Structures are given as structure tokens and as C-alpha cells.
Amino acid sequence: MHIDNFASGDSLLHRLDPRLKIVIAVLFSVIVAVADKSLCLATAVCFSLALLLIARLSLREVFLRLLVVNAFILFLWLFLPFTYGGEKLFSIGPLDATRDGIIYALQITVKSNTIVVALIALLATTPIITLGHALSHLYVPSKLIHLLFFTVRYLQVLHLEYDRLRAAMKIRAFRPGTNLHTYRSLSYLIGMLLIKSFDRADRIRKAMLCRGFHGEFYLLSHFKLQKIDVVMLLIMMLVVGGMASLQWIILK
Amino acid sequence: MDNSEVIIDLKGVSFVYHGNHSQRPVLDNLNLQISRGQRVGLIGPNGSGKTTLFHLLMGLLRPNQGEILVFGKKRQQEKDFREVREKIGLLFQDSDDQLFCPTVAEDVAFGPLNLGRTQDEALEITRQVLKRLGLEEFEDRLTYKLSGGEKRLISLATVLAMQPEVLVLDEPTTGLDEDTVERLIQILRSSDLTYLIASHNREFLSKTTDTVYRLAQGKLARAT
Ligand SMILES: Nc1ncnc2c1ncn2[C@@H]1O[C@H](COP(=O)(O)OP(=O)(O)O)[C@@H](O)[C@H]1O
Ligand SMILES: [Mg+2]
């Protein structure tokens, strides 16, 4: 499982109060997503690269994550330049690529990568469980947070269950191919997984009832802002605020 | 065995799983009495209905026939069983069902919090119980990253944290190594709880219990 891969470091960003990291991450992502001024985006790129350096994450790992993101963006490059109206730049066969289309695709690429890098540096450096607690202290509805907790907790169990079923198939010499037997067996696998999850959910509910559960959840951890948190919050707010004013006030 | 207060009394309990009516019942007119302080073992082949019996006792399943009396009161509805669940702690056969909170401390504190303890009290109980089981260093561990045996012990901690009067353990020794089983034996013997343990481990039962029943064909009989 790859949950929490980045969370084990000990950098400044790892130690920062997760509540303020969430706030900054949200503000930053929203601004980057709607901004279109190059200077604003350039600031954003520098900011997220700076965060990445401060977080001291393995650049190789981050790069691998970005590859996944950019695999999706590749599809945009196949369509956007040729379907967006505007001044024609060059053509491939019957297709005309436009200047505006290319700029648009470029912007989306830069924006997505910037946001993902910032999110990795800010959020992936906190264990997902701690993030959940931080979210609840930011008044996110507790139902959503418990959904998150249960998902994290049982993703692992489901994964193991899947592995067990797969192993059970393999040791009886199952080799997937393109034939009816394969499709039937794989659909059994998925069906079993669904039924097992359903049964599991029922048993968990029973176990919770046995321990006096009556619809109320309690959180044990609390956060306290340190001086360094306040300083970092101010610095990051300045940068994010600067980006916003570049976009909407200075370059208007 | 003394004649002290009977705290669990099953009278003529029969049970069939839904949609299984063609089959013979899992439990068939079964009787069981347990007095305070008694330590009872339960053996029986796989599928003989041990888990089913425990779930009936906790009110997770309802009998088709018969009566369930716990602490002298007849238990029929969900609200009758709420009190039962506060006083009887059930250790589930599969720990992954029992541990659902992200961290060990939260999972152990879940029961006490439900019983109306404050956060500080719940944490205090959690620490005590973990210490008693020699699991202090697990407090901040994530439940989904524990090994099978560790999950078993933490599950036991979550049950003990509710400070029950009766323990019901469903195959507690599966997945435990010898040393841990030995530790479990010590923990059980040093407690003054009433308990009921289903297990395939005869030696374990002979060291921890004073009466052993065998469950077969839906009925209980003294095992020798
Ligand atoms: N949810 C269920 N639905 C239908 N039948 C069940 C269910 N759970 C258990 N059974 C059946 O009831 C019988 C007793 O099961 P169980 O109480 O789990 O036995 P044990 O714990 O002694 O191994 C088995 O034959 C099993 O197939
Ligand atoms: Mg069982």
C-alpha cells in the first residue's frame, strides 16, 4: 500500500500544524486553478518548488507521481491544440493547431503539476489519519471524516482479501487470457470481493454495537499552534496573497 | 462448582439462519447456565455454532425459540441487550472486524467513551489496560499496520477497557505464538472475571477454565 509514503520524513513541513497546511493548500489550489496571468503562475511554480525543497522528499518518488498525473494531461495535448479556436500555428494533415489552444494546454499542464507538487509537499507530509483529525478541527462534518477513516482502515483489508483470492486462483494454475473462462473467473473474484465487503461491514457494525456504539464518535487528538507554525503561516499567506493580488489587482 | 448467582441462563434456545430453513437448526433447544465467577470452555467442530451462540448471547442475532436471561433479566429487544453489551465483553473471531479506529489508543478508548467516560478518563483507562497486557508501546500505532497476533491482543485490550463483568472470547488463541498464549493464560487466571471461551486448543482450555462443554448437533454436553 502506498498510503503515507511521504509522511515519514522530519522536515519543517512534516512538523507544521496540519490545520494550517490544509488551509494553505486549499487557498493555493483554488487561486492557481483560476489564475491565468503568467506572472502569478510563475510565482506559484516557484512557491511549490520551494515547498518541495523544504519538505526534502525523494525527488524520484515525486517525479513518479507526476508521471501519473501527466499521463492524463497527455490526452489534453492530443485534443486541445486542434479543437480550440483562434490563430492557426501549424497543421498536421487536415488538423490545424492554434496558438491559443497550445497556450491553453500549456497552462493546464503547468497548473496541474504545480498544484500536485504543492499538495504532495503540504499534505502528503502528514499521515492521512492526522489529516482527518485536522479536518475535523476545521469543522468538516464528522460523517465525511469517518468515511475517510473507514476507507483508509479497510482499504488495506480489502487489498489483502483481494490478494488472498488472487493467490487462491493462482495456486490452482489460473492464468488470465482473453477467453470466457478468464472473464467468468475474474467476475467471480469481483463478486466475492463485494459480498465479502458487505459481510465485513455487517460484522464491524456488530463489533461496534458490542462496545456500546450509539452513533457518536469521539476524537482523541488535539493540535496546538507553535511559534514556528505562526511564522510559517504568515510567510505562506504572504506568498499566496501576493499571487492573488498579482492576478486580480496589479495586472488587472 | 458453587451455587452462586446465575448470570447467564439460556433456556431452550433454537436458531436457524435466514433462508436456511430446509437445513437443521444451528442451535437446537440448547440450555446453558453460567454462574458468577465460573470459567467455562466451549469446544466443538468448525461450523458447530460457537460463534452463533455468542452472537445470540450479545443480542446480535435473535433466537427463533427459547429465552435468554442475563443478570436475572429476560432479554428480548435491542434495548435490553444494550445493558448486556456494557457488562459482557465479546472478543470477535476476526480482529479485523473489531479494530476499526485508525490508531490503537483510539480503538481502545472507543468503548469507554461510549460508556460516557470523559476523554481524560478514557485515555487513562486505555493506558492502564495496555500496560496490563504489556502493550504500552502500541498506543500510537496504526491498527491496520499490526500483525495478526498483535491485532488479537489489542482487540482483547479494547474489550477489557470496557471493564466488563463477563468475558466472552471467540477462539482467542488463533494466530498467537506460544509465549503470547502463555501470557494470555496468565492474564485470564489472574483476573476475577467470569468468562466463556470457545477454542480448539484443549491445553489452553484446561489451564484457564473449570468446566468445558462440547457443542455438537446444536446441543451442549459436558466434555470429558
Ligand atoms: N451469516 C450466516 N448465514 C447463514 N449461515 C451461517 C452464517 N453464519 C454461519 N452460518 C452457518 O451456521 C453454522 C455455525 O457457524 P458458526 O457459528 O460460525 O460456527 P463455529 O463458530 O462453531 O465455527 C455453520 O454451518 C455456518 O455455515
Ligand atoms: Mg466461530
Image (cartoon, rainbow, N blue to C red):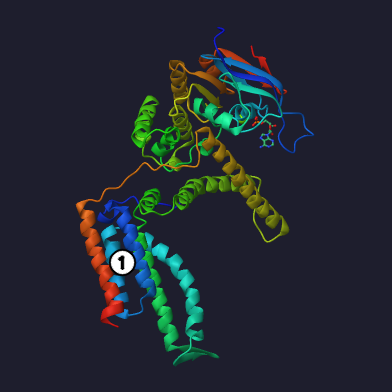
Residue at position x 43%, y 22% in the image = B183
Name the chain under label 1.
A
Q: Indicate left or right for B110 with B20 as reference.
A: left
Residue B91 percent location from the top left of the image: 52, 29
Residue A226 percent location from the top left of the image: 22, 51
Residue B22 percent location from the top left of the image: 79, 34
User: Which of the 4 image quarters holds residue B222?
Assistant: top right
**Vertical relation: B122 (above or below) B186:** below
Outermost residue, top side: B2
Examine the rendering and report whether any part of residue B30 can be seen: yes
Residue at position x 61%, y 48% in the image = A193
Between A241 and B203, the one lying in front of the other is A241
Disc 1 under 8 Å from ligand 1? The reply is no
Residue at position x 64%, y 50% in the image = A189
Label 1: which secondary element: helix
User: Which of the 4 image quarters holds residue B122?
Assistant: top left
- Which three-letter amino acid code belongs to the residue tagged 1? Ser
Residue ID for mark 1: A48
Q: Indicate left or right for A85 with A195 as reference.
A: left
Residue A19 percent location from the top left of the image: 32, 54
Examine the rendering and report whether any part of residue A93 can be seen: no
